[in-house]
Image (tube, rainbow, N blue to C red):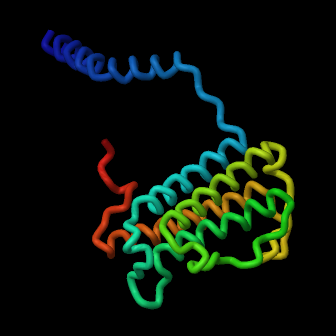
Amino acid sequence: MRRVICAVAVMLGIGVLTLPAYAQHATKKDVAIKPAPSVSQAVLEAWNDIGRKLIAMAEDFPEDKYDFKPTPSQSGFAEKLLHAAGANYFFTNLALGLKPPPEEDPKREKYKTKADVVAFVKKSFADGAAAIKTRGNKGMSSLVVDPDAHQETRVSDLAYGLIEHSGEQYGQLAVYYRVAGLVPPESRPKK
């Protein structure tokens, strides 16, 4: 008799413990699964996300520190932003059937103020987003010639390469923030 009571108690305990998991599973089954984003939507989301992060840094970093360098041999903060934004046109121009930019890095002398740099960073990401929208899903799989690699590449792969490049620049700029005694916008507590 004791065995039966113990077995019933164990089974009831297991039932009580598994009931929340079952209820959660049943609820998930009833919710429709969202479809995957289209190729152009996925590229656009990634492009806009890294753009948002770099724009936030450009707007947030104090203007009096825009030429800050963690070490003398490194580029200044503004130069890193200009490099990232200028590189975007190696995607945007090719995606739109134009020649790549003549120079890799826009000159700091051309973008003298924080407002000039912020405006250029915003424009480069807006122009890239417009190119992605213009190409659409079908255009993301079309081929362009990467002039640096002398190789055909899909427009989507070219976009992801520049998204990755912007992510690398973001990571480096996060270090600039920390060395300058500041906290990057993405690392601050969310409100």
Instruction: Pick out the residue farthest to the left.
Output: 2
Vertical relation: 92 (above or below) 13:
below
Residue 177: give x, y in percent of width and height: 36, 69
x and y, in percent, of residue 186 in the image: 39, 55
Nearer to the camera, 32 or 96: 96
Q: Residue 40: give x, y in percent of width and height.
A: 72, 44
Quarter where residue 21 is shown: top left
Residue ID at (44%, 61%): 57
Q: Is residue 40 shown left or right of residue 14?
A: right
Q: Residue at x 82, y 57 (%)?
A: 96
In the displayed structure, does residue 154 sit left or right of residue 32? Answer: right
Residue 76 against residue 73 in the figure, above or below: above
- What residue lies at 52% left-to-right and 16% top-to-bottom? 30
Image quarter (top left, top right, bottom left or bottom right) of the C terminus: top left
Side of 183 where 37 appears, left or right: right
Report whether 111 appears left or right of 21.
right
Between residues 45 and 72, which one lies in front from this camera angle? 72
